[in-house]
Image (tube, helix red, strand yellow):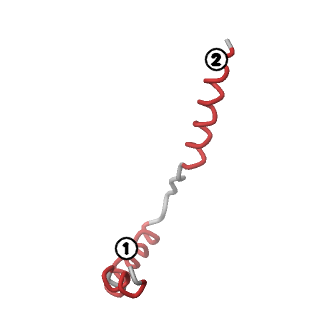
Amino acid sequence: MKIIREELKKLSSKIELLEAGMIQEEEISEEEAKELDRLVEETKKNGIPWEKLKAELGL
């Protein structure tokens, strides 16, 4: 019985960790989706290329 309780306690802890790490999904409006798409495109156009960033950081 003691072993079962210990295992249940371990499982409970693991479940709590999983629940804490879950990302809540959220509905967004069409307008918000368009704004996110615009920001993605802007970032792609104006972002710093990875190779350049690595060089600047000395990686």
Mark 1–mark 2 Cα distance, whole angstroms, equals 52 Å
Q: Residue furthest top?
A: 1
Q: Is residue 9 left or right of residue 46?
A: right
In the displayed structure, 34 sits above or below 3; it is: below
Q: What x and y, as percent, mark residue 58? A: 40, 84
- Say which quadrant the N terminus sits in: top right
Residue on which the image places disc 2: 3
Residue under the point 49% across and 57% down = 27
Expressed as whole percent of the image width and height from the top left, the position of residue 14 reads 58, 37
At label 2, which amino acid type do we have? Ile
Which quarter of the picture shows residue 6? top right
Determine whether, in the image, residue 53 is placed left or right of residue 16: left
> In front here: 36 or 56?
56
Question: Image quarter for residue 46?
Answer: bottom left
Q: Residues within 10 Å of mark 2 (few under 14, many from 20)?
A: few
Residue 51 placement (x, y as % from top left): 30, 81
Q: Judge the density around disc 1: few (<14), some (14-19), many (≥20) Cα neighbours within 10 Å.
A: few
* Quarter that holds the C terminus: bottom left
Q: Position of residue 40 (x, y in %)?
A: 37, 76
> Front-most of 38 and 29?
38
Q: Nearer the viewer, residue 30 or 13?
A: 13
Q: Residue at x 42, y 68 (%)?
A: 33
Q: Which is nearer the N-term, disc 1 or disc 2?
A: 2
Question: Residue at the spot x=60%, y=47% of the render?
Answer: 20
Q: Is residue 47 left or right of residue 1?
A: left
Tag 1: residue type?
Answer: Asp
Q: Which residue is mark 1?
A: 37
Dot 1: what SS? Answer: helix
In contact (CB < 8 Å): disc 1 and disc 2: no
Residue at 63%, 36% (x, y): give it.
13
Asked if 36 appears above or below 25 in the picture, the reply is: below
